[in-house]
Image (cartoon, rainbow, N blue to C red):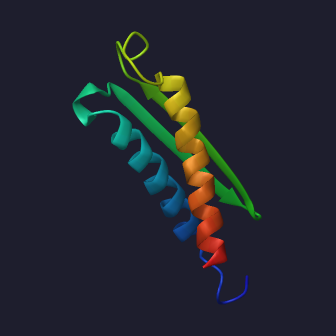
Amino acid sequence: MPADEPTDEAVVQTASDAAEGLIFSRYKQSNVRDCDVTVAFEDGVLEVDVYLNVPGAEEGPGPGPDQVADAAARAARDAVDDLFEA
């Protein structure tokens, strides 16, 4: 790995922070029953899996938990792309 590229740990932390940031910008933390963001970065391949349990969110206005989880995974990938472009 070239010296100017981010470490695997930095990539994982950046992705995780971005995903969690998006989730908690959409939902109050007290409304989230369970949230799991799993990030792996091996051999240059980023894998992001987001599980979100927000009771009652499907009935309310705005996107449901599945849409927010998908958006959180995209935000994680975008943040890592930005990290490598810096």
Residue at the far left in the pictured view: 30
Front residue of this view, candidates 62 and 39: 62
Q: Quadrant of residue 24?
A: top left
- Quadrant (top left, top right, bottom left, bottom right) of the C terminus: bottom right
In the rendered view, tell whether residue 45 sits above or below residue 25.
below
Residue nearest the viewer, comparing 1 with 16: 16
Furthest-bottom residue in this view = 3
**In the image, is residue 57 above or below residue 12?**
above
Q: Tell me residue 63's x, y (percent).
A: 47, 24
**Identity of the residue drawn at 63% across and 54% down:** 77
Q: Position of residue 84 (x, y in %)?
A: 65, 73
Q: Does 2 sit left or right of 60 as displayed?
A: right
Q: Position of residue 64 (x, y in %)?
A: 47, 21
Q: Quadrant of the N terminus?
A: bottom right
> Where does the image place residue 80, in percent across and percent down from the top left?
61, 63
Q: Residue at x 43, y 13 (%)?
A: 58
Pick out the residue farthest to the front.
61
Indicate left or right for 25 with 43 as reference: left
The relative height of residue 71 versus residue 59 in the rendered view (above or below) is below
Residue at 55 percent across and 39 percent down: it is 71
Numbered label tally = 0
